[in-house]
Image: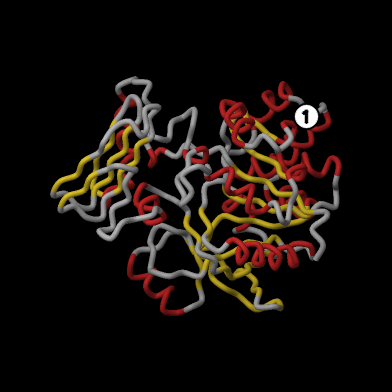
């Protein structure tokens, strides 16, 4: 299908606490170069890889008001008026609803894709091919998502159970499944009827507005009021805090009946922790991902990230250690086993409890 009416909404408001100390409240993980390119942030990579389908003037960024300026810096070619800065986080349903209403003001027949800002894709042409497929049922009125073909029995993802085929290998969604235990995840992998839920959505503006009116009428009322009163920052600040705090999954996708899923297999990672960063990084023969000039003696499978303002001026030396994460910034150093990479967020909890500003 033609992409001339396609708009992209990139959700870029997360906190990224599992990437402390590099990710902070004022500069969370989507602004960091955590993929394979040390010079490209995850957010910039997200926008770049969809540019062949959607030009910058039809790219919209949904973020927090405190991240407005970093977003302008990260994406200088995206119009500033396309940055939707939420005064308070209310989860993904209000976020997607606001973007949908904003786009529909000038393009009521728009087809909209919604993508997270902090994912990594290995096969970018393959990714764009799957997006093009997903836009087809979306244009027909389906609320469409991409499901990732699972490669392991992962308990960290929600799953999508496949329903009947609707053509071209695309399927209806039978149901969405919360994160399973190990035994259930293994059965899903063996059965071949479940995909990982990657949080990507495709729909027409009309279909999403109708779905919100049906399933979240209080959200529709607030969004109608915002745009009836001009949609300015002061109006958004008045109404946004009153909107229901609910995800698009729980608020819409799990309730609607016209849900389609397109399987995707394009080297996807949600870059969920420093473990993911190690997996994506260039590694030496011993599996170490190190900054230039680092020394590793009898050390294997370590990740070292030098992310302070003096990056490149220090020598990192590892002797006799394996499977560690070491991250240095100007005001903090994190050291933990790679197997506990998810627990970096526990440090943030401790710092908040102590009232410190290193979060």
Picture residue at 51% right of the left edge, 39% below the top: 14
Residue that label 1 marks = 231
Quarter where residue 168 is shown: bottom right
Quarter where residue 71 is shown: top right
| 286 sits to left or right of 345 | left
Closer to the camera in the image, 75 or 206: 75
Q: Where is residue 112 in the image (x, y as percent from the top left)?
A: 73, 52
Picture residue at 83% right of the left edge, 55% below the top: 4
Q: What is the residue that sits farthest to the front in this orientation?
A: 293
Question: How many numbered circles does the render carry?
Answer: 1
Closer to the camera in the image, 47 or 264: 47
Q: Position of residue 130 (x, y in %)?
A: 64, 66
The kind of secondary structure element at disc 1 is: loop
Q: Position of residue 338 (x, y in %)?
A: 27, 50
Q: Where is residue 182 in the image (x, y as percent from the top left)?
A: 33, 66
Q: In which quarter of the image is the N terminus?
A: bottom right
- In the image, residue 25 sits, relative to residue 339, either above or below, namely above
Closer to the camera in the image, 264 or 329: 329
| 293 sits to left or right of 8 | left
Mark 1, Cα crowd under 10 Å, few <14 / some 14-19 / many 20+, is some
Picture residue at 33% right of the left edge, 24% below the top: 331
Protein image colouring: secondary structure
Q: Quadrant of the C terminus?
A: top left
């Amino acid at each position: 299908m033609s992409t001339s009416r396609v708009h992209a909404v990139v959700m870029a408001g997360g906190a990224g606490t599992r990437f402390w100390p590099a990710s902070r409240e004022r500069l969370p993980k989507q602004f960091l170069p955590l993929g394979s390119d040390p010079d490209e942030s995850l957010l910039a990579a997200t926008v770049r890889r969809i540019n062949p389908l959607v030009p910058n003037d039809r790219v919209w960024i949904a973020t927090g008001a405190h991240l407005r300026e970093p977003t302008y810096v990260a994406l200088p070619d995206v119009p500033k008026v396309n940055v939707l800065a939420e005064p308070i986080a209310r989860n993904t349903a209000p976020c997607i609803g606001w973007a949908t209403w904003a786009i529909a003001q000038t393009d009521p027949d728009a087809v909209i894709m919604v993508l997270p800002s902090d994912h990594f894709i290995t096969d970018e042409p393959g990714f764009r091919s799957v997006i093009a497929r997903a836009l087809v049922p979306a244009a027909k009125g389906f609320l469409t998502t991409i499901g990732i073909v699972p490669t392991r029995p992962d308990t960290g993802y929600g799953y999508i159970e496949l329903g009947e085929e609707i053509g071209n290998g695309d399927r209806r969604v039978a149901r969405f499944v919360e994160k399973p235990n190990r035994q259930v995840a293994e059965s899903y992998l063996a059965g071949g009827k479940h995909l990982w839920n990657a949080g990507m959505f495709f729909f027409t503006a009309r279909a999403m507005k109708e779905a919100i009116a049906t399933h979240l009428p209080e959200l529709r009322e607030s969004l109608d009021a915002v745009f009836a009163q001009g949609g300015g920052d002061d109006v958004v600040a008045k109404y946004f805090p009153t909107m229901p705090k609910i995800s698009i999954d729980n608020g819409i996708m799990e309730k609607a009946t016209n849900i389609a899923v397109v399987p995707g297999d394009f080297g996807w990672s949600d870059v969920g922790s420093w473990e993911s960063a190690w997996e994506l990084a260039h590694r030496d023969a011993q599996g170490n991902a190190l900054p230039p000039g680092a020394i590793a003696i009898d050390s294997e499978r370590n990740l070292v990230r030098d992310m302070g303002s003096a990056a490149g001026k220090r020598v990192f030396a590892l002797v006799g250690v394996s499977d560690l994460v070491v991250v240095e910034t100007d005001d903090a150093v994190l050291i933990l086993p790679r197997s506990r990479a998810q627990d970096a967020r526990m440090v943030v909890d401790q710092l908040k409890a102590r009232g410190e500003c290193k979060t």
